[in-house]
Image (tube, rainbow, N blue to C red):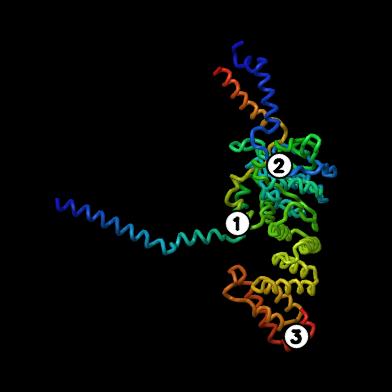
């Protein structure tokens, strides 16, 4: 019984100590944290290199990729380095075509549902 | 008669379909977007490059570049902006390619009123539209070249259509789904009509400057300066451009004006001192550099400041005293 109570107290002690250590560490900037902050200030040459690699991966030729990154501003490089796979890629033919028909079909499906319900 | 197909084509559903169609055409899917009615315009001189496959980006860019008087090589533009892995073109690359053509791309304010303001000034507007739904987007680039108040349609160079007409409300909701992203691509010396904040203009010009001739850049800075004569960054950019344009005296007057308003502008002190050194005004340069508070020097400027101070020390070694004219600089 005594041993068990000691065990509980030990656990409490461990929790308190680790908890305290955790808060104490928040005031010190860890090395990894610091490096991450420094990475956000990556210099332009590194950003160019990174975007160039991405362009190559997405099918741009060597010479074109080089010329393309050269014309991008720092902010644009950062944006592409971070989000090249998510940014809107305008490419579809803007005639009525596919999109309109898809929208119409969606609505049509809605209508047929209503009719069957009635 | 009970089949799915027959239901669709029954007279009742035909009528429903018609109503639905009209509702979609009227843009019933969203709330009405309010904006001043655009002026009646038809920019007939804007060329047309029909798009091929997924290449509405290069086609729209060719359209505005051609209007701006730039030589257009469509194949080269495809190589500049088309991204095969995404089957389309990204906005930052469209902007960058306009720079490479010696033109200045200005993003317009994300506001439904921007297009009307640009059309009134005679500028075609390259826009990104989302022709799909917010949840399943279909991104498309087109160029707005006019507005017809009779039927309330925008006129666009779009895809394979030379004069595509789109109801303003329908257009606006597709443009809204693309965050109202638009671009005017202007020849040097011109400014967009819709942008009333100076900072984005300065940024656009500064980013394009590396691809402009000295004269073209200078002409555009002077245009900005005429409109914003007291803005520190306009003064700074204009002073640098005037110096590159081999007009050190008028550059110096802008640096002086800037430092009177903003004595803590470190980059301006550095560039002004460098100019003074090039004119043999070593003591004047020393005075200008002495105004720099080391604590206020950002990291990225530290190298330049060190270099200028070193040149100053070297020049000072052989220098007796400034010529009289330096007092005026």
Q: Give the residue number, with chain letter if any, for mark 2.
A: B141
Kindly indicate the quadrant of the structure image that contains residue B208. bottom right
Of the 4 image quadrants, the one containing the C terminus of chain B is bottom right
Of the 4 image quadrants, the one containing the N terminus of chain B is top right
Residue drawn at (66%, 42%), measured in percent from left and top? B176
Q: Picture coordinates of residue B134 (x, y %)?
A: 61, 38
Q: Is residue A89 above or below residue B205?
A: above
Instruction: Please state the chain letter of the residue tagged with numbered disc 3 in the rendered image.
Output: B
Mark nearer the viewer, 1 or 2: 2
Q: Secondary structure at mark 2?
A: strand
Q: Give the residue number, with chain letter if any, for mark 3.
A: B322
Q: Secondary structure at mark 1?
A: helix
Q: Picture coordinates of residue B269 (x, y %)?
A: 68, 74
Q: Measure how far apart labels 3 and 2 are at the Cα level.
A: 59 Å
| Residue at the farthest top position | B1
Residue B284, disc: none
Residue A47, disc: 1
Using residue B1 as the reference point, say whether residue A9 is left or right of it.
left
Kindly indicate the quadrant of the structure image that contains residue B139. top right
Mark nearer the viewer, 3 or 1: 3
The answer, for residue B73, to whether it is visible in the render is: no
Q: Are marks 3 and 2 on the same chain?
A: yes
The answer, for residue A63, to whether it is visible in the render is: yes
């Amino acid at each position: 019984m005594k041993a068990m109570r000691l065990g509980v107290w030990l656990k409490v002690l461990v929790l308190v100590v680790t908890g305290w250590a955790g808060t104490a560490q928040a005031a010190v900037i860890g090395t990894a944290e610091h490096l991450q902050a420094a990475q956000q200030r990556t210099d332009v040459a590194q950003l160019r290199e990174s975007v160039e690699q991405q362009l190559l991966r997405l099918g741009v030729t060597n010479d074109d990729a080089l010329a393309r990154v050269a014309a991008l501003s720092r902010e644009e490089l950062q944006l592409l380095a971070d989000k090249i796979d998510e940014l809107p890629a305008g490419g579809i033919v803007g005639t009525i075509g596919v999109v309109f028909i898809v929208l119409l079909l969606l609505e049509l499906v809605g209508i047929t549902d209503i009719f069957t319900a009635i | 008669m009970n089949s799915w197909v027959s239901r669709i084509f029954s007279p009742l559903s035909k009528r429903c379909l018609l109503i639905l169609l009209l509702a979609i055409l009227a843009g019933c899917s969203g709330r009405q977007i309010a904006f001043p009615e655009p002026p009646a315009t038809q920019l007939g001189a804007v060329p047309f490059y029909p798009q091929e496959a997924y290449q509405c980006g290069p086609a729209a860019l060719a359209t505005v570049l051609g209007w701006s008087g730039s030589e257009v090589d469509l194949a080269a533009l495809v190589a500049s902006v088309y991204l095969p892995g995404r089957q389309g073109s990204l906005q930052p690359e469209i902007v960058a390619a306009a720079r490479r053509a010696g033109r200045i791309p200005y993003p317009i304010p994300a506001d439904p009123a921007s297009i009307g303001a640009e059309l009134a000034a005679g500028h075609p507007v390259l826009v990104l539209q989302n022709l799909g739904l917010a949840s399943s987007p279909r991104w498309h680039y087109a160029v707005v070249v006019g507005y017809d108040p009779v039927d309330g349609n925008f006129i666009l160079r779009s895809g394979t259509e030379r004069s595509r007409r789109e109801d303003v409300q329908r257009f606006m909701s597709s443009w809204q789904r693309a965050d109202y992203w638009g671009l005017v691509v202007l020849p040097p010396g011109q400014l967009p009509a819709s942008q009333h904040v100076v900072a984005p203009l300065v940024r656009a010009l500064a980013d394009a400057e590396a691809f402009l001739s000295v004269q073209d850049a200078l002409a555009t800075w002077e245009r900005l300066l005429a409109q914003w004569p007291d803005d520190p960054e306009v003064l700074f950019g204009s002073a640098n451009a005037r110096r590159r344009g081999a007009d050190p005296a008028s550059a110096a007057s802008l640096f002086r004006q800037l430092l009177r308003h903003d004595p803590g502008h470190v980059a301006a002190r550095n560039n002004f001192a460098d100019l003074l050194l090039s004119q043999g005004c070593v003591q004047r340069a020393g005075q200008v550099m002495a105004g720099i508070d080391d604590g206020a020097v950002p990291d990225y400027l530290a190298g330049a400041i060190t270099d200028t101070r070193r040149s100053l020390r070297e020049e000072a070694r052989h220098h007796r005293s400034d010529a009289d004219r330096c007092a005026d600089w």
